[in-house]
Image (cartoon, rainbow, N blue to C red):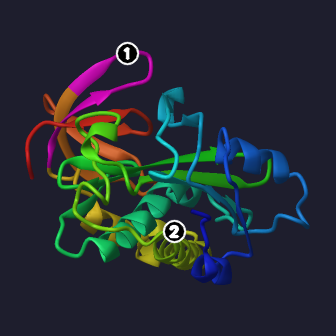
Amino acid sequence: MTLSFPGASAVASRLEVLPESSSTNAALRALAADREAWPHLSVLVTDNQTHGRGRLDRTWTTPPGTALAISVLLRVLPASADARGWLPLLAGLAMTEAVAAQLPDAAVGLKWPNDVLVGERKICGILAEATSDAVIIGSGVNTAMDAEQLPVGTATSFAVEGADADPDRLLADYLRGLDGLLSALIAADDAEASGLRALVSARCTTLGREVVVHLPGGAQFRGTATRLETDGRLVVTGDGEERAIAAGDIVHLRPA
């Protein structure tokens, strides 16, 4: 079935549907050199991504037609480095709200920094990548996968949750949320003043949880996730010490 996105196309400055892509992020990065043809809030989307890539260079593949791969080009960005540090969380919040709109009876939340969970299972992952003058936000949303097609036991999909996802509505809601949150952050150039810090904290299921933090390089430690710093880093308290985490894998150890 050919994907159609009339609602999302009305929000995006440019939206192209690819029948197949090895990586929508890589494809958009190559196209982004043409600033006039690919302006701010340009989008590539496919339901057949063959070599997707997540955080820490992990690769993942999905059966054709069972997941959406979405990449959004952001050219208009906050001025300060602290505000820019919130972009992955901002995108995660926008997608959390878009998923929750189609799963109104489910517990949909944001796992730091930008995984969307239904209960304790991941339905969407997000990867933000910087270019020389822009940021590309890539996301992969499990839509029609059945239980046997899920890549890991900790994943889920709209189909597994008993819902028939509306891809156009999902993408349109996500883009509207992303654009609105980004506009507010740019205007204030501060996550606190814009209200973003409070909104993310309210949706972030990591806060208040006992977690294990796996740092790049292999080190790990255990503690309680207590708050988000002004630049979006996660503060974890363990053994009487607070540590602000900028990058790493977070494992939730107990239900909230």
Q: Give the amino acid at mark 2.
A: Asp
Residue 7, how many percent across, how many down? 58, 82
- Residue 95 drawn above or below residue 157: below
Q: Give the amino acid at mark 1.
A: Gly
Residue 241, how many percent across, how many down? 21, 33
Left or right position of 181 against 76: left
Which span of residues is magenta-colored? 209-221
Circle 2 sits on which residue? 190
Q: Within the image, what quadrant is residue 221 found in?
A: top left
> Seen from this angle, which residue lies furthest left?
255
**Residue depicted at 61% across the width and 74% down the height:** 5
Pointer 2 and pointer 1: residues touching (CB < 8 Å)?
no
**Residue depicted at 66% across the width and 38% down the height:** 22
Circle 1 sits on which residue? 218
The residue lying toward the viewer, choosing from 109 and 192, is 109
Disc 2 crowd rating (10 Å Cα; few below 14, some 14-19, many 20+) is many
Regarding residue 12, the answer to whether it shows in the image is yes
